[in-house]
């Protein structure tokens, strides 16, 4: 909700005096949902719009009797609760950001951002020098003319503590150009970053990261979420593996939260409830199991300065414990119960019995070649597969096929290893069918693929994504763009609905990666911020271009409509009323023609909604239209 949108301040590039604690909404449902995924503690950072976004705070995520943000803070720093300076260190935390975000928000460049950093640190350095001189005179007994209190400035005191080594600095940064600027900044002002966040290109320049003042920072990153902007485009699923092997501490992320015991989050960019899944994916792509678990427990706890009480199950540590229903790195691992300070957090836990095999560390492929290729090709390894005229798959444990009722069922190979032989994309013979028996020997030119006991089935279909229409989300030159809607003045000029087929671009990296992971077909509709999105298209993800035979499977698959509340949209009742009017219209325009096809059941109509109330209204509208047209809407 806009009333609680306190992630970023837009009052200047460097704002070290701001505190994330002042923007915490204790009623945010994200706390409860995050805990249900096994997260017990979070480092709550300001957003990434500013070069220096402000101070961060570590929170325990359980409710407190006081019900305030301050009561959730773990070991408040002296600046918050005025504990004695002689008490054990209470770490402070701060957020920095480089790259596209500050440049976009402040209409500047990386040069502007780096200059803003240097200006801010220069002010902090001046304050530090004034304080040091004061203390030196006091220690020498030179009291004449010395003020009663040391010099201080609320705007710069937190950044001065960075220079004194009292602050854990977490930096949002992606690219080598930004890393290089930060390396120079840290050495100029002599401070060590605790962690570089996102850091999609860090695995390509590990020697550069070693040059930070104080040595290697940790790297907090997503497992697979990349390519959404230019500075993330060369991200690799093998980055955690590569960074770990280079001696870096790896933390897995999943936005305003960066979480401990269940790691680092980027909620709501990725739902922090599923943080453990990031560790599971990193493990699948080569991060050792122990390092994957550490990446969401002990490593972030230590980096935040709480290794003395978080991240381990042992005497004297906080009783923050998650009881998992299966091995934490297994697919779908879910908490039976989550304890924070020994207090159970899930009132009615759902228990699902899982096979015994799920209690073991999942087996993973050998990714050595792929990881080396990621570095060799600077994050852009070739993704197009080789083509074979004929191929035989051997050692197949089972196949999935449709039975006479149209339901997918698993057919086991039996005593012999399963075999399937294809020529020019067509099945020639298989051991799974008595009428298509394979020969004992295949021609020498046939490519052989050993599935090692794997399974085969129909290719997956992506529906609802923007594959084919969006390559780099934040780079409009790589996208189809936003279509005009009925509430845009330009809509009347267009005169027809946008067709996804007209905006398709092939050989995008996300499309090819989808294909390599079994998603052979996609259905995508034009992007829209208005009521009518247009007409979707079905296509092959591996196709080279639109004119390639079979690239476009179906030019028009469905009519897409979006119903949602928004500032620049008419009311929901206006949107639904207009939809009713168009569906029942006898107008002969091209646009209403598509809706007549939908109303008569000839063309599927797909609604994009995010509210149960809107869904209910649309179901009522469907019944109304069907009663008047005597046709079934698809």
Image: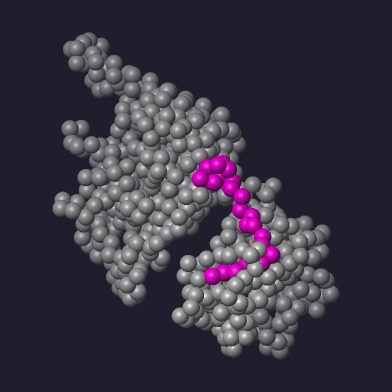
Image location of residue 144, percent across then percent down:
22, 10
Q: From where the camera sits, is residue 92 visible? A: yes
Please identify the quadrant where the C terminus is shown. Answer: bottom right
Between 190 and 550, the one lying in front of the other is 550
Reply yes or no: does residue 472 show up in magenta.
Answer: no
- Count of marks, rendered view: 0
232 vs 450: above or below: above
Residue 57 falls in image quadrant: top left
Residue 89 falls in image quadrant: top left
590 vs 98: above or below: below
Image location of residue 349, percent across then percent down:
31, 72
Image location of residue 224, percent across then percent down:
50, 54
* Residue at far left of view: 315
Residue 615 falls in image quadrant: bottom right
583 vs 358: above or below: below
Left or right: residue 255 versus residue 108 is left
Between 594 and 385, the one lying in front of the other is 385
* Residue drawn at the location 33% of the way across and 65% of the way down: 360
3 vs 390: above or below: above
* Residue stretch in magenta: 372-394
Q: From where the camera sits, is residue 483 visible? A: no
What is the basis of the colouring in this image?
Answer: one colour
Image location of residue 71, percent across then percent down:
27, 51
* Residue drawn at the location 53% of the way across and 38% of the way down: 175
Reply yes or no: does residue 376 show up in magenta.
Answer: yes
* Residue drawn at the location 35% of the way across and 74% of the way down: 355
Between 610 and 185, the one lying in front of the other is 185
* Residue drawn at the location 35% of the way across and 70% of the way down: 357
């Amino acid at each position: 909700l806009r009333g609680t949108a306190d992630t970023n301040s837009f009052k200047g590039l460097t704002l070290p005096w701001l505190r994330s604690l002042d923007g915490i909404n204790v009623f945010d449902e994200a706390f409860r949902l995050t805990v249900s995924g096994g997260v017990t503690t979070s480092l709550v950072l300001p957003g990434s719009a500013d070069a220096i976004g402000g101070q961060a705070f570590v929170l325990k995520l359980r409710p407190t009797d006081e019900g305030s943000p301050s009561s959730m803070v773990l070991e408040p720093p002296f600046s918050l609760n005025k504990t004695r300076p002689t008490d054990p260190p209470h770490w402070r935390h701060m957020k920095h950001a480089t790259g596209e975000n500050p440049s976009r928000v402040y209409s500047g460049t990386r040069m502007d951002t780096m200059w803003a950093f240097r200006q801010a640190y220069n002010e902090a350095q001046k304050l530090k020098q004034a304080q040091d001189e004061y203390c030196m005179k006091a220690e020498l007994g030179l009291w004449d003319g010395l003020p009663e209190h040391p010099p201080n400035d609320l705007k710069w005191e937190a950044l001065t503590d960075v220079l004194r080594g009292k602050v854990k600095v977490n930096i949002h940064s992606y690219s080598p150009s930004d890393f290089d600027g930060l390396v120079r900044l840290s050495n100029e002002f002599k401070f060590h970053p605790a962690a570089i966040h996102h850091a999609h290109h860090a695995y390509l320049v590990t020697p550069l990261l070693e040059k930070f003042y104080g040595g290697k920072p940790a790297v907090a990153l997503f497992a697979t979420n990349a390519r959404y902007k230019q500075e993330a485009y060369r991200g690799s699923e093998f980055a955690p593996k590569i960074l770990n092997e280079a001696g870096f501490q790896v933390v897995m992320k999943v936005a305003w939260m960066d979480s401990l015991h269940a790691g680092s989050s980027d909620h709501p960019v990725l739902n922090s409830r599923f943080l453990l899944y990031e560790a599971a994916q990193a493990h699948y792509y080569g991060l050792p199991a122990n390092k994957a678990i550490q990446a969401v427990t002990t490593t972030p706890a230590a980096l935040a300065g709480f290794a003395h009480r978080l991240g381990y199950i042992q005497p004297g540590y906080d009783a923050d414990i998650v009881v998992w229903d299966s091995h934490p790195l297994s697919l779908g691992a879910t908490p039976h119960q989550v304890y924070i300070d020994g207090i159970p957090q899930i009132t009615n836990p759902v228990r699902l019995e899982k096979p015994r095999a799920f209690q073991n560390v999942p087996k993973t492929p050998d990714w050595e070649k792929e990881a080396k290729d990621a570095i060799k090709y600077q994050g852009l390894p070739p993704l197009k597969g080789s083509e074979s005229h004929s191929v035989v798959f051997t050692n197949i444990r089972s196949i999935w096929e449709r039975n006479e009722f149209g339901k997918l069922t698993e057919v086991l190979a039996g005593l012999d290893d399963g075999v399937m032989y294809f020529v020019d994309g067509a099945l020639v013979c298989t051991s799974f069918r008595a009428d298509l028996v394979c020969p004992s020997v295949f021609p020498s030119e046939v490519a052989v693929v050993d599935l090692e006991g794997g399974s085969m089935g129909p290719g997956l279909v992506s529906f609802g994504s923007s594959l084919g229409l969006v390559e780099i989300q934040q780079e409009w030159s790589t996208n189809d763009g936003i279509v005009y809607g009925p509430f845009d003045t330009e809509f009347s000029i267009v005169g027809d609905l946008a067709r996804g087929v007209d905006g398709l671009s092939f050989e995008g990296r996300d499309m090819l990666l989808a294909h390599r992971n079994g998603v052979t077909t996609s259905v995508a509709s034009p992007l829209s911020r208005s009521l009518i999105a247009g007409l979707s298209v079905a296509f092959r993800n591996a196709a080279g271009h639109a004119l390639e035979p079979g690239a476009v499977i179906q030019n028009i698959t469905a009519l897409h409509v979006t119903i949602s509340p928004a500032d620049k949209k008419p009311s929901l009742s206006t949107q639904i009323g207009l939809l009713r009017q168009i569906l029942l219209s006898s107008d002969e325009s091209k646009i209403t023609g598509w809706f007549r096809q939908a109303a008569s059941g000839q063309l599927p109509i797909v609604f994009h909604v995010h509210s149960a109330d809107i869904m209910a209204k649309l179901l009522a509208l469907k019944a109304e239209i069907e009663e008047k047209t005597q046709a079934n809407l698809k």
